[in-house]
Image (cartoon, rainbow, N blue to C red):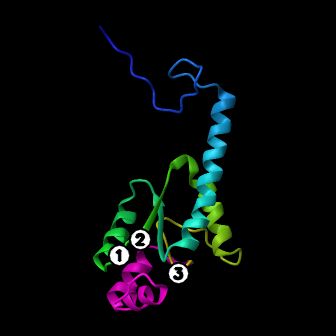
Amino acid sequence: MQSQAIPYGTWVPGTPPGHVSSSARDQQAAAVVSRSAASVQKLVSENAVTVVGRRGCCMCHVVKRLLLGHGVNPTVFEVDEDDESNVVVELRKLIGEGQEDWPQFPAVFVGGKLFGGLERVMATHISGELVPVLKQAGALWL
């Protein structure tokens, strides 16, 4: 007996497994995109340190490990490929329209403001300036 694998996706009750109508799929995708993009602003404003990066990105992992090594438990928001453009637009609104460059991943927010990417985090770590910045944001207590 051979079994058929059910493709990964959202299943709508009342339809056969693996079948989702295009209109239902579009509505669900739009709802997920708007929820995830809006949740970026909420995460950044509610947490001392937030890392926004692509799902499975090695640079995001490096930033997270460095911060964990300092005793900071950053909130990590992983962005799917389908959702990337919407999240970048939300980040652009969050950062401000005055910025000429579009935000790149990983984007590290400290104290609700864009701190920078991997290069900035590493540079401030090497120069010894990272710990005072984290203390000022309330991410470190010592």
Magenta: main secondary structure: helix
Q: Residues within 10 Å of mark 3 (few under 14, many from 20)?
A: many
Residue tagged 3: 111
Q: CA distance from mark 3 to mark 2?
A: 11 Å
Quadrant occupied by the N terminus: top left
**Position of residue 47 measured from the top left corner of the image (x, y, whole percent):** 50, 73
Quadrant occupied by the C terminus: bottom left
Q: Amino acid at mark 2?
A: Pro
Question: Counting residues from the N terminus, which is met first, the one under dot 3 or under dot 2?
Answer: 2
Left/right placement of residue 68 relative to residue 32 reads left
Residue tagged 2: 74
**Position of residue 48 measured from the top left corner of the image (x, y, whole percent):** 48, 77
Q: CA distance from mark 1 to mark 2?
A: 7 Å
Left/right placement of residue 10 relative to residue 73 reads right
Residue tagged 1: 67
Contact between labelled residues 2 and 1, with CB atoms less than 8 Å apart = yes
Question: Counting residues from the N terminus, which is met first, the one under dot 1 or under dot 3?
Answer: 1
Q: Which residues are magenta?
A: 113-142
Q: Amino acid at mark 1?
A: Leu
Q: Is residue 22 magenta?
A: no
Question: Toward the viewer: 71 or 102?
Answer: 71
Place residue 131 in its image quadrant. Answer: bottom left
- What is the number of the mark on residue 134? none
Contact between labelled residues 2 and 3, with CB atoms less than 8 Å apart = no
Secondary element under disc 2, as helix, strand or loop, is loop
Q: CA distance from mark 1 to mark 3?
A: 14 Å
Q: In this orientation, does residue 67 appear?
A: yes
Q: In this orientation, does residue 100 appear?
A: no
Question: Counting residues from the N terminus, which is met first, the one under dot 1 or under dot 2?
Answer: 1
Q: Is residue 139 magenta?
A: yes
**Position of residue 90 measured from the top left corner of the image (x, y, whole percent):** 64, 63
